[in-house]
Amino acid sequence: MNQYFFTEEHELFRQSIRAFLDKEVRPNIEQWEADGQIPREIYKRFGEMGFMGVTFPEQYGGMGLDAFYAVVYTEEMVRMNSSGFSTSIGAHAGLALAHMNAEGTEAQKQKYLIAGLKGELIGCLAITEPGGGSDVASLTTKAVRDGDHFVINGSKTFISNGVLSDYIVAAVRTGGPGAKGVSMVIIDRDTPGVSATALKKLGWHASDTGEIAFDNVRIPVENLLGDENKGFFYIMQHFASERLAMALIGVSQAQLAIDLAIDYMAQREAFGRPISKFQVLRHRIAQLSSEVMANRAFVYTLYRRFEDGDYIIKEAAMAKLVATQLSDKVCYECMRIFGGYGYMESYPMARLLRDSQLGTIGGGTSEVLCEIISKMLIDSKAYKAAVPH
Ligand SMILES: Cc1cc2nc3c(=O)[nH]c(=O)nc-3n(C[C@H](O)[C@H](O)[C@H](O)COP(=O)(O)OP(=O)(O)OC[C@H]3O[C@@H](n4cnc5c(N)ncnc54)[C@H](O)[C@@H]3O)c2cc1C
């Protein structure tokens, strides 16, 4: 299938990022998982190598490459088997910088995007609040205009890079109730009134996930990102690429689980023969691989459409829905192939299984995705792009 989507150049890029990750990331993953964060130096290494901005414009320090380079990048990141690590980089580049690139003014890009692509300034995207994450239009963090400033009060939770990032791209209420009263703003970490606490969680251990409080935080009006009261629509628009990326991560995690299980089956013996000879396990691999292959073909096809400029909001939701559920199933089934070793931290399956679980929650839960898809299918609801991507 790969030859339909990837050129020789894509495959050369794969070799180069794989070599980089094997040398500079893989040996450190255990330590970073134990630390609950990744060091700032690794962001800078990604910047130096150009990997922070594979698809970002060259004028700001990106590589300006097509979406299939981003696919290669994501697939290789998943093979490190630490969603905490890949999320730390991804929440900065794929979330905060994606908003900066799409909605930022030239001055904002000069300040945050250039330094961000070098890995020198780290960002996070703060939408979810303690009172609710799925219902974005009801968020309550308030930004009230006071002369040339906004004064912000409220809190955000479950924010990736929430404690360690240098600035926060936050969704705040600048207008009345509902979707039309939400704006995006940039809040520098060192602004008085900003505080954050790290949260403990089931998986994604190498990722810093934080709760952030804003207590009378004053930011200049120039820190508005995009048009006032258009924030909700920007968020929804970015969800298309975010959900597509999460679908890709889902199928890539599932593929990694299968690859690890096949290796293990060849080495482990039971009843005097390799467990790869047991038909029940062989058929499990055959079944799961077929499902992963079919899903991967769907995801790659959507990347082609995305690259061609289609607004694939429904299809991205569908892809994330099925791929993240598939990942959970495959990781669980493959963990069982490892028997007791599957449950051990010294083997890869335990982390893969717990890291996979976030897929059906972040970036829109499976239930919320079903709501969106069913409204589009049954009620003929149409969602239009806020700005062309
Ligand atoms: C490790 C981690 C990292 C995260 N990183 C970020 C980040 O960087 N930035 C950020 O902004 N957020 C982040 N999130 C938050 C994530 O996006 C939210 O957790 C998610 O959107 C769900 O919101 P919630 O947790 O408030 O659940 P709720 O919205 O309270 O939902 C609770 C339950 O109700 C269901 N539900 C809600 N509405 C409906 C409906 N209409 N129909 C049917 N069922 C419904 C949900 O599916 C869920 O099962 C992160 C979360 C985690 C755990």
Image (spheres, rainbow, N blue to C red):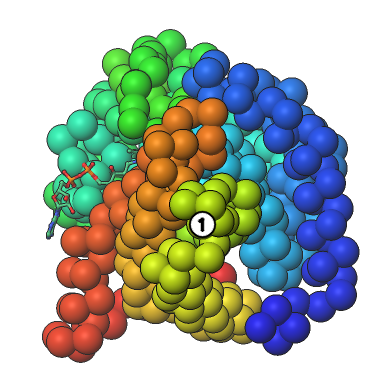
Q: Is residue 290 visible?
A: yes
Q: What count of labels does the image hold?
A: 1
Q: Is residue 32 left or right of residue 194?
A: right
The residue located at (62%, 56%) in the rendering is 266
10 Å crowding of disc 1: few (<14), some (14-19), many (20+): many
Residue 88 position, x and y percent, is: 55, 35
Along the line of sight, the residue nearer the viewer: 317 or 341: 341
Residue 203 position, x and y percent, is: 40, 34
Question: SS at mark 1?
Answer: helix
Along the line of sight, the residue nearer the viewer: 89 or 252: 252
Q: Is residue 195 left or right of residue 26?
A: left
Q: Is residue 56 visible?
A: no
The residue located at (48%, 75%) in the rendering is 286
Instruction: Using the rendered view, name the quadrant where residue 381 is placed.
Output: bottom left
Residue 188 position, x and y percent, is: 52, 24
The residue at label 1 has a CB less than 8 Å from ligand 1 = no
Along the line of sight, the residue nearer the viewer: 72 or 67: 72
Quadrant housing the C terminus = bottom right
Residue 259 position, x and y percent, is: 59, 58
Quadrant housing the N terminus = bottom right
Instruction: Using the rendered view, name the quadrant where residue 324 is placed.
Output: bottom left
The residue located at (72%, 50%) in the rendering is 53
Along the line of sight, the residue nearer the viewer: 62 or 289: 289
Residue at mark 1:
275
355 versus 31 height, above or below: below
- Residue found at the far front of this picture: 272
The residue located at (34%, 27%) in the rendering is 201
Amino acid type at mark 1: Ile
